[in-house]
Image (spheres, rainbow, N blue to C red):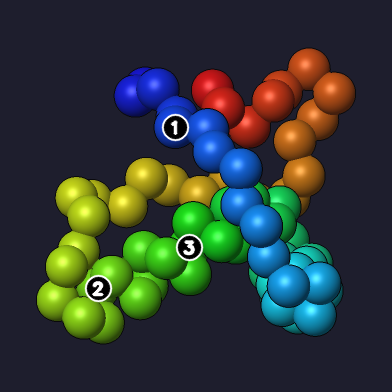
Amino acid sequence: MAERKKFLLRIDPEVFEAVQRWADDELRSVNAQIEYALRLALRQVGRPVGPDRPVRRGRPSKGRTGEE
């Protein structure tokens, strides 16, 4: 699997809380939810990014980091 790019994101606390609630509803991590929202937005403006990788539902287990 391709390496994941890491970066720091500064975000308004209210926006973060809204994303956290959305992620919880979808059984995703906040990180996965942000990536999902970015891919959705890119598709909507005609700039899709390759085929979507399958999304693993739920939180990573202790032995799994989510970057596998």
Comparing labels 1 and 2, the label whose residue is closer to the camera: 1
Disc 2 to disc 3: CB gap under 8 Å = no
For marks 3 and 1, the one nearer the N-term is 1
State the residue position of label 1: 5
Pick the residue in front: 51 or 35. Answer: 35
Kindly state the secondary structure of the residue where label 3 is placed.
Answer: helix
Q: Which secondary structure lies at badge 1?
A: loop
Residue 62 figure quarter: top right
> Which residue is disc 2 drawn over?
43
Inspect the image, locate mark 2, and give the three-letter code of the amino acid beneath it: Arg
Q: Is residue 42 left or right of residue 29?
A: left
Q: Residue at x 14, y 76 (%)?
A: 46
Q: Position of residue 59 (x, y in %)?
A: 77, 44
The tag on residue 55 is: none
Quarter-of-image position of residue 5? top left
Mark toward the viewer: 3 or 1: 1
Identified at 78% across, 17% down, the residue is: 63
Residue type (three-letter) at the residue carrying disc 3: Tyr
Give how far across and how far down residue 54 sits, in percent.
43, 47
Q: Please, what is the three-letter code of the amino acid marked with disc 1? A: Lys
- x, y percentage for residue 2? 34, 24
Residue under the image location 80 percent in, 80 percent down: 14
Quarter of the rendering occupied by the C terminus: top right
Residue closer to the observer: 32 or 64: 32
62 is higher (above) or lower (below) than 13: above
Residues at marks 3 and 1 touching, judged by CB atoms closer than 8 Å: no
For the residues labelled 1 and 2, say whether their Cβ atoms are less than 8 Å apart. Answer: no
Tell me the crowding category of disc 1: few under 14, some 14 to 19, or many 20 or more residues within 10 angstroms, Cα based. few
Numbered label attached to residue 36:
3
